[in-house]
Amino acid sequence: MLHISTHGLFISSDFVIFKGMNLAPDKPAEFRIDVPLADFTTIHLGGAARYFVACQKIDEIISAISFYRTTGDPMVVLGGGSNVVFPDHGFNGLVLKVELKGVSFADDGDYMIVTAQAGESWDDLVKVCVNKCLAGIECLSGIPGTVGATPIQNVGAYGQEVKDTIASVKVIDRGTLDMTEFNSSDCRFGYRSSRFKREDKDRYLIVEVGYRLKKRGEPIVRYQELNDFLRKRENGAENTETKETNLKAIREAVLTLRKKKSMVIDPQDPNSRSVGSFFVNPVLGNSEFADFLLRVRSLSLDEPPTFSDGLGTKIPAGWLVENAGFHKGDRRGGVGISSGHALSLVNYSGTSEELLVLASEIEKSVLDKFGIKLKREAVIIE
Ligand SMILES: Cc1cc2nc3c(=O)[nH]c(=O)nc-3n(C[C@H](O)[C@H](O)[C@H](O)COP(=O)(O)OP(=O)(O)OC[C@H]3O[C@@H](n4cnc5c(N)ncnc54)[C@H](O)[C@@H]3O)c2cc1C
């Protein structure tokens, strides 16, 4: 075990590489060696991290980064581990787990600015906001992981995305150690994407996110499946009913729908040992979409439901997977496809290698049959 303190370094025999470094951080950070990673992830895969540090304070993060980066070895920032797959052989670098905690509320007229530290549980935050009748993130109920990861891929579900409410994202530049605050447009959000996942991948560590939520806000239900569910529950009431439906009812409905698909982490549900959707829904330009439709018709398949916006036409990746010959509940050794959701690859008792072989098999079949290259939503660490 290694400690960094204002008095110098306490170095285990494994840590001679850091001998002689002279740091004077404000707070001690404890580096651990050979820490198994599987149970820090929701898919329970991966070997050990060569080094591991959990940071509860910003000082600790800055100390750990400035201490470690001089080695030139790789570093991975970890939140709740619900969107990462580590390799079976482990990670030969530092895993820095963000455990910053704290939530504050500030009035902003008809809105409330809710500022949460990166290590807060996302779903706990949603619950608190729903209970306070703050609208804007209720459809994002049940998504595992931490607040700090939500801007990375612009977390979204059931017609809402965090980009709709994010007001600020406070980050540490891992290179300069400067702290910067971005507004929503600075983050360059896209569908399951942002600058943090694209051009600035691995550049910033997010320490805090501010969300601007509507006080006593009316829920806005944009997603057909959720709308249908709510209407059925209201005994066939008219569409306007959903507008009156309160935020708690939306949260409960979303959680019910998600549980049916094993999209809520439940230790009793083996199908929830996943990273959620493994692939994102492809968004096709006009000519790609035309090619795709030709293929669908030549195969005498029914056309999938599609969604068009200014960016193109979104095709459900689950439809592609199922029509490329894979089925919910399929197994390949210790891994498989969730019986609740065709996009969710599950680890029952397998390995990262098995999982990635299955993912590649699916990608190849979808490409061969539909000419579409699936993009992985999950972060695969090498
Ligand atoms: C059952 C299930 C259902 C899911 N449903 C959805 C869904 O409906 N919609 C959706 O969008 N996602 C969904 N996901 C994916 C996942 O929950 C989200 O992407 C979530 O935001 C990841 O949070 P995390 O803290 O677990 O991140 P991690 O898995 O720990 O990390 C994910 C990525 O973010 C980076 N990262 C994490 N924290 C920080 C930080 N503080 N600063 C910088 N980088 C950081 C990591 O380096 C990594 O690249 C689901 C996952 C599961 C297992």
Image: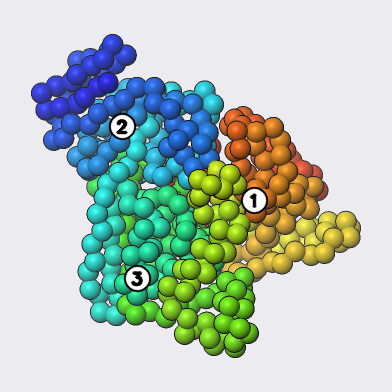
109 vs 34, left or right, is: left
The picture quadrant where one finds residue 274 is: top right
Query: Of callouts 2 and 1, which one flags the residue occurring earlier in the amino acid sequence?
Result: 2
State the residue at coordinates (61%, 83%). Answer: 235
Disc 3 from disc 2: Cα separation: 34 Å
Q: Nearer the viewer, mark 1 or mark 3?
A: 3
* Colour scheme in use: rainbow
- Tell whether label 3 touches label 1 (CB within 8 Å): no
* Residue 53: mark in rendering: 2
Q: Amino acid at mark 3?
A: Asn
Looking at the picture, how far across and down is residue 378, in whole percent? 54, 44
Considering the numbered disc 1 on the image, is that residue within a helix, a strand or a loop?
loop
Q: Quadrant of residue 22?
A: top left
**Label 3: how many Cα within 10 Å (few below 14, some 14–19, many 20+):** few
Residue topped by disc 1: 343
Residue 123: quadrant of the picture = bottom left
Left or right: residue 205 compared with residue 270: left
Q: Amino acid at mark 2?
A: Val
Q: Earlier in the sequence, mark 3 or mark 2?
A: 2
Image position of 104 (left or right of 83): left
For numbered disc 3, what is the local secondary structure? Answer: helix
Label 1 beta carbon within 8 A of ligand 1: no
Give how far apart the Cα atoms at labels 1 and 3 are. Answer: 31 Å
Q: Which residue is mark 3?
A: 131
The residue at the point 61 percent across, 57 percent down is 261
Query: Residue at point 65% right, 33% down?
Result: 334
Nearer to me, 246 or 170: 246
Q: Tell me where residue 174 appears, x and y as whole percent.
A: 31, 38
